Image: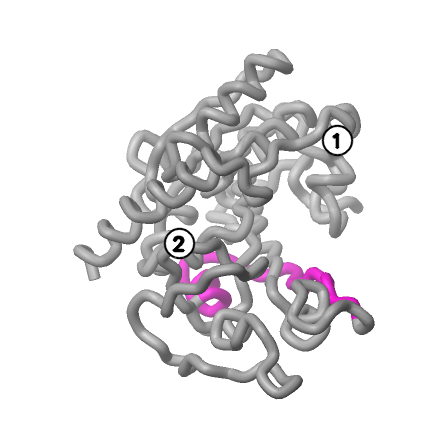
């Protein structure tokens, strides 16, 4: 598994560098309008009622000049980790343009060397766990660098979505990959729910949700972001989402050690 994990990291770093060079929509930076009022964009589900002012935030697998600038604009002390040098360069450009302080580290999310234990109040991670084989290694590192009582807000590609055909066949979407599929997923091109050329892996709900609990987290909320549209063109992203929910968003809290209180800014409102 180690050899394949290393190969996947190198391959996906190159793919995302290429996507930046191609100016793919997946690599678009955040707008100035959003930076002027960032909270609605980082607090969609009201999981951060106190905001993030003065909090230490890790944007994990989140390069590209979008997430890190939003949290910096909201007043957080931000670190962004990504495997792609080109995606991190977009964060550097945004930080320079808007006078943000954003620490940038090129790392695989399963090996966060250089980050201290219990360093962060909040870790946010957009869809990216599909690019790694070792989901347990991700959970272990997140647990290590997050403070007790801190929040981990993460979004995944739903396992069922990765098992299902990108386009309808005879008017129906079909399951084509086993729920226990091992190894890299078959490649795909021309799909809005998977990045062309990327090496991706299927993780079960047991691994994504149960594994997080086994690493010392309590799941406080879980959402399925809705992107479906019944009258959308068959085969389009919105049409497929009507039948196959693409994402899973979770709010998880690191269990508190004895004598350690939850930060009042990250804690739920009274």
Residue 42 visible in the picture? yes
Residue beneath the point at 35% across and 77% down: 181
Residue 213 percent across, percent down from the top left: 47, 63
Farthest residue, direction left: 3
Q: What element carries label 2?
A: loop
Residue 83 percent across, percent down from the top left: 37, 39
Along the polypeptide, which appears first: circle 1 or circle 2? 1
Q: Is residue 227 magenta?
A: yes
Residue 150 visible in the picture? no
Q: Is mark 1 on a helix, strand or loop?
A: helix
- The color scheme shown is one colour
User: Of the numbered discs in the image, which one, if any, rests on residue 198?
Assistant: 2
Question: Based on the displayed image, in which of its 4 quarters is residue 1 positioned?
Answer: bottom left
| Start-end of magenta stretch | 208-229
Q: Which of 52 and 42 is in front in this view?
A: 42
Marks 1 and 2: CB-CB under 8 Å? no
- Which dot, 1 or 2, sits closer to the camera? 2
Residue beneath the point at 42% across and 42% down: 16
| Side of 190 relative to 179 (left or right) | right
Q: How far apart are marks 1 and 2 (CA)?
A: 29 Å
User: Of the numbered discs in the image, which one, if any, rests on residue 34?
Assistant: 1
| Side of 256 relative to 170 (left or right) | left
User: Of the numbered discs in the image, which one, if any, rests on residue 8?
Assistant: none
Above or below 14: residue 162: below
Q: Is residue 221 magenta?
A: yes
Above or below 55: residue 45: below
Q: Count of labels shown?
A: 2
Residue 87 percent across, percent down from the top left: 46, 33
Q: Nearer the viewer, residue 135 or 240?
A: 240
Is disc 1 surrounded by few (<14), some (14 to 19) or many (20+) residues within 10 Å?
some
């Amino acid at each position: 598994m180690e050899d394949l994990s290393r190969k996947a990291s190198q391959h996906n770093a190159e793919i995302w560098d290429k996507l930046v060079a191609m100016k793919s929509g997946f690599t678009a930076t955040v707008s100035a309008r959003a930076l002027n009022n960032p909270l609605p964009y980082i607090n969609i589900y009201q999981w951060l009622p106190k905001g993030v002012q003065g909090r230490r935030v890790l944007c994990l697998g989140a390069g590209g000049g979008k997430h890190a600038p939003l949290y910096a604009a909201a007043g957080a002390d931000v670190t962004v980790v990504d495997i792609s040098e080109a995606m991190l360069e977009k964060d550097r450009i945004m930080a320079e343009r808007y006078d943000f302080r954003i620490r940038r580290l090129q790392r695989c999310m399963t090996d966060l060397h250089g980050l201290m234990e219990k360093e962060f109040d909040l870790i946010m991670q957009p869809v990216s766990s599909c690019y790694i084989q070792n989901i347990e290694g991700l959970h272990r590192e997140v647990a290590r660098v997050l403070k007790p009582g801190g929040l981990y807000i993460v979004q995944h590609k739903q396992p069922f979505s990765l098992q299902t055909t990108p386009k309808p066949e005879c008017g129906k979407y079909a399951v084509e990959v086993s729920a226990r599929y091992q190894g890299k997923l078959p490649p795909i091109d021309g799909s809005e729910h998977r990045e062309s050329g990327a090496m991706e892996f299927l993780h079960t709900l047991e691994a994504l949700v149960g594994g997080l609990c086994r690493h010392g987290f309590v799941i406080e909320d879980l959402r399925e972001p809705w992107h479906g549209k019944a009258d959308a063109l068959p085969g389009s992203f919105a049409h497929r989402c009507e039948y196959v929910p693409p994402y899973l968003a979770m709010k998880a809290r690191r269990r508190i050690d004895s004598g350690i209180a939850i930060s009042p800014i990250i804690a739920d409102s009274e």
